[in-house]
Image (cartoon, rainbow, N blue to C red):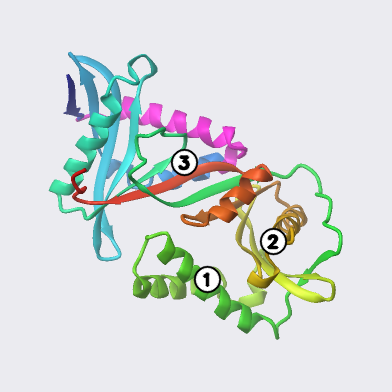
Amino acid sequence: MTEFNILGDSTNWQKDFERRLRTSYTAAGLGAAAAERMLDERSAGIGDWTVAEITDAGTRVGYVAVVVADDSGTLAGRIGDLRVDEPHTDRGHEQAARDWAEGWCAERGALRLDIRLTEPAGELFDGYRVRGQLRTRHVSSPPEPVDGVTARPMTQAEYPEWLVSEKVAYVGDIVRAGALSPEEAVRKSDRDFAKLIPEGLATPDNTFLVLEAVGEQIGTGWLKHGFLPGVTYGYSLHIQERQRGKGYGRAAMVAGEQATLAGGDSALMFTVWGGNEVAMNLYTSVGYQVVEESRSISLPRSAA
């Protein structure tokens, strides 16, 4: 029978948790310094987590860690960790731990439960909606450009229209992923853009691109260099809707990888919002690995 014992001292669990995360991040292609930064962000507030030892007939078989906190005015729970040791997997302990975490968070008023996965979860979280994926790829050498497609710096005259369209697209991505309401998404968009590019085109360590083919604009790009040590983050590599289906998505990735190397980094990272299967398939086809996948479910969970 699966039982849960809340730990007073979670030191051993934390060491094991951090070790597993480092291994996962480096396996996805991140360097040691970038993996440490990811680990610091992932474990922020870890002292507030409630950690339970999963046991079976008195034997420890794994751990589950949970927390409930305010998220933009909504109480949200989070499964920070759910781990069953290899000799004890596939015996129902994972499902029991998931159910325990859902109940624990619901009892404390959480209306949503989030989890960030760093490895495939099988069917355990199939009922959770995919909110987004963080993907990355190591760029070791300049990629071959796509014939007929060029990338140039965005001009000041082009920037205002681009900014408006990017904000609209960002709001749409957030809402489609089920992360926030339309009103909340608009407020988040305004906050995020003001924080990320306060000086517009002149904001340091950012690259803004216009992609062109056969004499006309086909898309744009926005990348942040040094987002993590050695890592450029692609906030946007966008192909206009009427230009899609022509292979330009791959051309945009090439432009992003070229800009990554020009910016002094060796890895390119993206967030793909849930519901954007086209982008997920593109990134998979060109070798971008999933670093983390965010999922969520509403609480209390509806009866099956």
Q: CA distance from mark 1 to mark 2?
A: 19 Å
Q: Which residue is mark 1?
A: 169
- Do callouts 1 and 2 mark residues in contact (Cβ within 8 Å)? no
Q: CA distance from mark 2 to mark 3?
A: 37 Å
Label 1 crowding class (10 Å Cα cut-off): few <14, some 14-19, many 20+? some
Q: Choose the circle earlier in sequence order: 1 or 3.
A: 3
Residue nearest the observer in this picture, 224 or 184: 184
Q: Which residues are magenta?
A: 8-34
Q: For this view, does 146 lie left or right of residue 53?
A: right
Would you place residue 9 above or below residue 154 in this image?
above
Would you place residue 140 above or below residue 222 in this image?
above
Magenta run includes residue 183: no
Amino acid residing under circle 2: Gly
Amino acid residing under circle 3: Leu
Q: Choose the circle earlier in sequence order: 2 or 3.
A: 3
Q: Which residue is mark 3?
A: 39
Q: Disc 1 on helix, strand or loop? A: helix
Q: Residue at image x 53%, y 42%?
A: 291
- Do callouts 2 and 3 mark residues in contact (Cβ within 8 Å)? no
Label 3 crowding class (10 Å Cα cut-off): few <14, some 14-19, many 20+? some
Q: Residue at image x 71%, y 57%?
A: 256
Q: Disc 3 on helix, strand or loop? A: helix
Would you place residue 193 above or below residue 161 in this image?
above
Identify the main secondary structure in magenta: helix
Q: Position of residue 188 (x, y in %)?
A: 41, 70
Dot in front, 2 or 3 = 2
Quadrant of the image containing the C terminus: top left
Amino acid residing under circle 1: Ala
Dot in front, 1 or 3 = 1
Q: Residue at image x 68%, y 69%?
A: 220
Label 2 crowding class (10 Å Cα cut-off): few <14, some 14-19, many 20+? few
